[in-house]
Amino acid sequence: MKQPNLKKAEEASLLIVALFITVVLAMLASSALFYASNRRMTMSRAGNWQEALVVAEDGINTALGQINAGLTGTDGSITSATTGWINSGTTVMPVSHSGDSVVSGTAIYAITRVPFPKLPNAAFYKIRSLGVVPLPGSQALSIDSADGVLRKLNLSGTALSITAGSSTVTLRDSANGIRTAVRAVEAWLYPVMTGDVGLLTGTDISLSGNPIIDAYDPTDSRRSQGGISTGNPDNPFEVTGGLIGSAGQFTALLTDANGVPAPIYDASIATDGQLIDAGGAIVYGDASTNNGTVTDAGSVYGLISNDFYQTMPPVGAPDWYVHPSASTPYTDKGSINGNLTLTGSSKANPARYVASFIALQGNKCLKFDYGSPGTSTTGTDTSKNYIEIYVTGGGNGGNSGYSISTKGQGAQDGSITIVDGVHITLYVAEGIRATGNSLSNTSKSAANLTIYGVTPPAGAPAPTYSWGGTSDFYGTIYAPYASVNLSGATNVVGSVVAYSAILKGSVHFIRDVSLAKDSKLMGFRYSSWFEDTGPSRLSISGSY
Amino acid sequence: MKHSSAPAHSAFSLPELLIALSISAVVGAVCVGVYVNLQRGYTFVMTWSDLDNNLCRVEDSIAVDLRNATSITITDTPPVQTLTLTVPQCYSPGPSGTLYSPGDSRLNYGDAGYDPGKVRAGDPAPDAILNSGTLDSTSAKLVRNGTLQVTYSGRALGTSGQAIQRMAIWSGSTAALSGTAVRDVAKFDGGVNLTFQLSGTTVSGTTLLSSDTVLGVLLSGTSSDKYRPKTSTLQDTVYLRGNKFK
């Protein structure tokens, strides 16, 4: 009789027990690993989701840089951005970051140009940018559905991709295991015009004595006085008015006769530099620096901020001078130091002149007038009222360094006089020195006189523009390389963009708010920023 | 017939059994102790991980809304401050009835630009249409449907717990552009602190200026683990976009 093998029976029991324990331990371990892995994946994906926003903003900033770099179109269009820029359709740009886990992403951005009739020299832009970052792990989402609501990751679904030019970016593809975090940002850009601020400089602004910085709008009866209605049925307040007088925006009437509130205009001063010495001056607006300070700012009525920066595109010699052609001829007047009248032409084809310098004193006068022939009554043609002149500088004797020097002793004496209604665009290679009301814009409209300071050659001294004595200046100055000195009882109406500015004494600086629409485009700034978290976040389009 | 004497060897003597049981007891006790500690450690790590994930969710949710907000107001005092935001209403109702077939009991999102349900409460509806805005011909300001008021505040859970909830109230010119929704962003069974800082200083009763560039969001949550309650803190600095670019 064969006896049962008890030893073998014991071994089988041990094996079962061992297997059972092993299974239990394996389940515990896999459970622990599953939950730990799940949480690690959640944190990792949260990081990628954050990275996607950075990538999307990279796209926005790159597009802004390209738009600013290519501003050469007279209507604010982009014509010469950096090589590789696609100014129509959609651009795909690889972006690398050295984050915790993400090393690369892709920005896809598209721009849309939005013309604005009130700004014929500019346009608005909308930039839409998608930041696409690949995700690790499987299709499984976190155990918490809140992640699905918040981050809306592309873990599964039918294949979806965006094609731009020769590039294709896949947003999701379950069959091939492609999963991404996508975040979409839209930003609007508004054009920054030279007339948008009262006083803007590249470096310090110094105010001392009793200057007043103010603003008015000659096209609004509520912000000017003595105006004549233009008869615009859409705007009963539209007039051609004059200065409010000594009253500032904050003390003038804030409503019209019908109780309609008048807008408050900002006579802001700003610098790309670090210092505005307000010197106790009254400023009816903001004072902004570039990470700097505003000292002695007790009478600054607006906001004081230190996060300002505005690019100031340089100005070259006028194109009609650099590249003369039969269609844009100019007349060289040599040096102007005696009595002379320069006449205008149409807005579409203005009269163009070149002079080496303008030096007037005594009874000498330069007059800008309408073109002729005109009516038998006036002898002039009021439609011929546009003049462009380039003063190249050099050879101005005792006034070396100044393209224009005038010593006025009366409205018609030692002065430059602009006949009412004539529009002057003046390009200046060197400095300007004017005393005794010697630059007379008889229309008292700042829109009728625009001065551009041409960028000096490398190594040349910075030009100086100075007004002193008892002088009135109605016009705009855009001279990013010039130092502007205003002193005495000088009234400046318009806007000034310069390298630096010193205002001393009882200078009254009044920004003309209406200038913005016709002034020079300096660049673009953000006016709106929005992250699209809706179903449209996976699509992009633009129209340029 | 010859019998095998082998079975006699398989038995254990009493001392052997006692020794084996003693060793087993010691080994077992060690194993149980280790297991319990491992389990506690595991639970602790999981709790800590959940806590951090929840903090991260709240921070991320607040950051998205903060960046889009054009007006930011902070009220109440710590430990849980209330954040009230005005966000442009950038979504329009989708085409009504296109998402689900007739007779489907699920919500027809075509009625609103934002989801009034529970899970995605206050988020753009699945078929919402993006409204990028149009330029006003006079003021050059962007015009959208209206505004969305988003509020983050605390909600008590039991005796010590607290949730951070997000309430969205959207209002526009039509009923379809108006609605309300509330959802819990995350729950903290041991309580939560939520404070907001400008330049490192906690602010209250404040509406931020356009010149305020960044806002610090300081969040700390506590788990209710009775052995080792864990408090974790997360601080985020949010660059304010909509509040500045307007």
Image: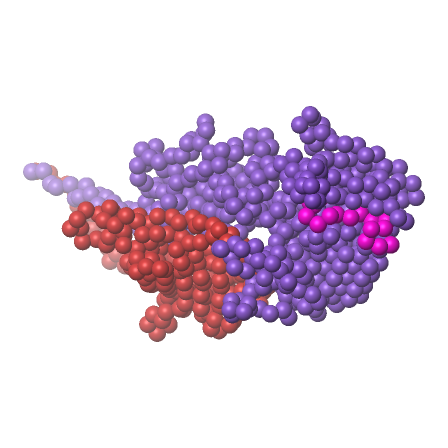
Chain colours: A purple, B red
Q: Main secondary structure of the magenta part?
A: loop
Left or right: B99, with A300 as reference point: left
Q: Position of residue A369 (x, y in %)?
A: 74, 43
Seen from the viewer's position, the closer of residues B182 and A484 is A484
Q: Is residue B156 magenta?
A: no
Left or right: A460, with B52 as reference point: right
Q: Position of residue A12 (x, y in %)?
A: 20, 43
Res. A235 in view: yes
Residue drawn at point x = 92 percent, y = 44 percent? A398
Residue at the extreme front of the image, as rendered: A376
Res. A32 in view: no
Left or right: B143, with A4 as reference point: right
Residue drawn at point x = 69 percent, y = 25 percent? A326
Q: What's the magenta region?
A: A409-424
Q: Position of residue A21 (x, y in %)?
A: 27, 49
Q: Quadrant of the N terminus of chain B?
A: top left
Left or right: B14, with A416 as reference point: left
Residue drawn at point x = 50 percent, y = 47 percent? A187
Residue at the extreme right of the image, as rendered: A398
Residue drawn at point x = 82 percent, y = 41 percent? A340
Seen from the viewer's position, the closer of residues A335 and A10 is A335
Q: Position of residue A395 (x, y in %)?
A: 89, 37
Residue at the extreme top of the image, as rendered: A326
